[in-house]
Image: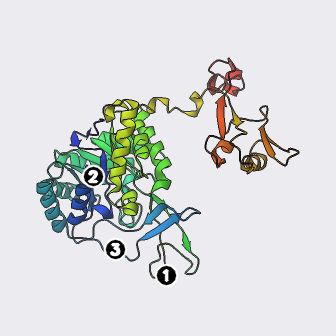
Amino acid sequence: MADLKCTIAGIESINPFWLASAPPTDKYINVVRAFEAGWGGVVWKTLGEDPPVINVSSRYGAHKDQKGSMIGINNIELISDRPLEQNLAEIRQVRQEWPDRVIIGSMMAQVEESSWKELAIKIAAAGVNGIELNLGCPHGMCERGMGSSIGQVPEMIEETTRWVREATNLPVFTKLTPNITNILWAAEAAKRGGAHAVSLINTVNSIVSVDLDVMAPNPVVGGKGSHGGYCGPAVKPIALNMVAEIARNADTQNLQISAIGGIETWRDAAEFIALGADGLQVCTAAMLYGFRIVDDMIDGLSNFMDEKGYQSITDFKGLATRNTVDWNALDMNFDTKAVIDPDSCIECGRCYIACEDTSHQAISFDVEADGTRVFTVVEDECVGCNLCAMICPVPDCIAMVPVENDLPYLAWPDHPKNPIKAAE
């Protein structure tokens, strides 16, 4: 049976699934319930200096698909609004009761060296395994010069990371904001500051929806709304790309990664690991389905590893990174064509409509004498875009089949139609 133990920043965990810093990790009772359910660790909800912050009501907004399923949450809640000493006392208690589980202390402070160092020392003394620097929250705290207002300035990322490294011997995770032009600027700054690992992504700055009766963004607070942090399955593609960018960048490829962003299933977890993640953090899925969702993640990841013959997470960590390249490195001579299985086709015509209206008019449509509708791919027009296969409601009815053309690998820099190549 596959071994799900992992090590990140020198911290050993019974499995890679940690709860991210957020409402689910705000207090003793939540964290204990999480550990009882099987989570390998938690990142305690971000701690700040006293006096505690003051939150508003309401705090969450929802983004749903057309069937009503939640695909994202917008959150305008701030860091922990409980007294610092109360949080630290509960961390000490959990530490004693659950010595085999990971507790990471998340923290946020004003841009003053003494503030970061003094708070880090207090959190370290509570018995945490490491410290995570919250440099990513895009609402509320950034208006006070903290959170993403620090995380969007590489020099400040480097500085705050170095301050905490100097204040404690514990592993330091620098949590990055996605609300930045190039994630590598932030990751490289964290590395220069001495981070043992980076955590990403924090939430995406957003307005999730508008209440058309009140005419204000959700969540509505006394008739007004604000931008907030967007999380959940919808942000996964953004997170995967940023994790991959860090994992394959020469200057950061050895930086360990605690991946966050829309992880809801074992497959999500495996994808992040395949792109270079050393550990995983989950929040929205636990908020939507409860702590027991970790059972499905553990069983599913374990079964996947058994089927593939992976004995440990390190066996497949980063295997997809090598196949993640810049667009210019793609083979322009590779070709695929859609093939429709007439025996599976239910004659709905969605492939035809999509291709005819929005793509390449590569599917023809005929009606036979008995009234059967027949859809056929016009190979000369099909560019292999995948749209028909993606929207077809019948699994495996439309396959994308590689074309044997005997042409050699040819990337854009060497393509004869590239103006630069042509000028040589």
| Residue 39 circle label | 2
Q: Left of 391 or right of it: where is 307? A: left
The amino acid type, in three-letter code, at marker 3 is Asn
Q: Earlier in the sequence, mark 3 or mark 1?
A: 3
Q: Distance between the residues labelled 3 and 1?
A: 16 Å
Up-down relation of residue 133 to residue 417 (above or below) = below
Residue 157 can be seen, yes or no: no
Give the percent coordinates (x, y) of residue 92: 13, 59
For residue 242, say whether it is visible.
yes
Residue at (43% x, 44% y) in the render: 267
Depth check: give the residue in front, 120 or 371. Answer: 371
Which residue, given by chain and number where applicable, does mark 1 sit on?
223
Quadrant of residue 49 in the image? bottom left
Residue 2 occupies quadrant: top left
Q: Which amino acid type is marked by label 1?
A: Gly
User: Among all residues in the image, which is located at the extreme right?
Assistant: 369
Nearest to the eye among marks 2 and 3: give it.
2
Dot 1: element: loop
Q: Label 3: which residue?
A: 55
